[in-house]
Image (cartoon, grey):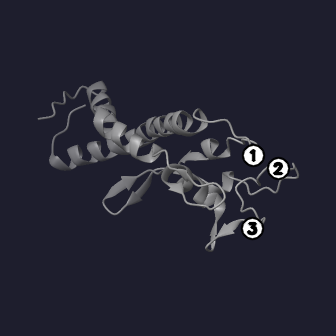
Amino acid sequence: MIITDWEQLADYLDNSIKQCLPIIANKVSKILKRFVKERWYNTHKPTHYRRTLEVLNSITVSEVQQVGNGYQVLVYFDPSKINNVLTDIKGYFNHHMSIDGSSTWSGMNLAELVPLFMDQGQSSKIRPYSGVHFMQATIDEVKSSQIDVNVLKRRLRSQGLNITII
C-alpha cells in the first residue's frame, strides 16, 4: 500500500482503528469474565440461592459506533440477560430480586444493580458483603498490558507499517 498524502494516512488509520476495536473489546470481555469468575464465582459456594451464571453470561460487547470524531465499543453487563425470578425453594433467595419479591430497588431494576453490588459490595441488613472489585482489576490489566496499543500495532505491522512507540 502506498500512502501519498495526509488524508489517505488519516483514512487508513481511521479504518484500522475501527477494525481493531472489536478485537480489543473481545479481549477486554475475556479479562472481565476471568475476574468475575476468579473473584466472585470461584470464591464461595452459595447456600441460599441457586447460581444461574446469568451475570457472567450477561457480559456483552457492543457494535462499534461512531461518536464525534472517533469510535467506541462498549463492554458491559446487559441487564436483559439477568432475569428476576421468584424461587419456590424454601430457604432460598429469589434470583436477582429483593426478599419481598420486588425486582426494583430505589426505582432501578435489580438486574442492573446486581453486577454493581458484586463489584462494589452492599450493606444489606440481611446479608451484607464486600465488593470483589473485578471492574478495577480489569481496567488495571487492560492498561498495564496495553491491549489496545498492541492490537493496533499488530494490525499496522501486518500491513507493512513498522510502528515504534516512543
Q: Are marks 3 and 1 in contact (CB under 8 Å)?
A: no
- Residue at disc 3, secondary structure: loop
Quick one: 24 or 8, which is closer to the camera? 24
Kind of residue at disc 1: His
Q: Are marks 1 and 2 in contact (CB under 8 Å)?
A: yes
Counting residues from the start of the chain, the first of labels 2 and 3 encountered is: 2
Kind of residue at disc 2: Gly
- Residue at disc 2, secondary structure: loop
What is the spatial separation of the Cα atoms under label 2 and label 3, in whole angstroms? 17 Å
Quick one: 119 or 59, which is closer to the camera? 119
Residue 125's spot in the image, x, y percent? 63, 62
Residue at numbered disc 3: 102
Q: Is residue 97 left or right of residue 134?
A: right
Within-10-Å neighbours for mark 2: few <14, some 14–19, many 20+: few
- Residue at disc 1, secondary structure: loop
Q: Is residue 152 left or right of residue 45?
A: left
Residue placed at 76% from the left, 53% from the top?
93
What is the spatial separation of the Cα atoms under label 1 and label 2, in whole angstroms? 6 Å
In this view of the protein, can residue 162 be seen by the observer? yes
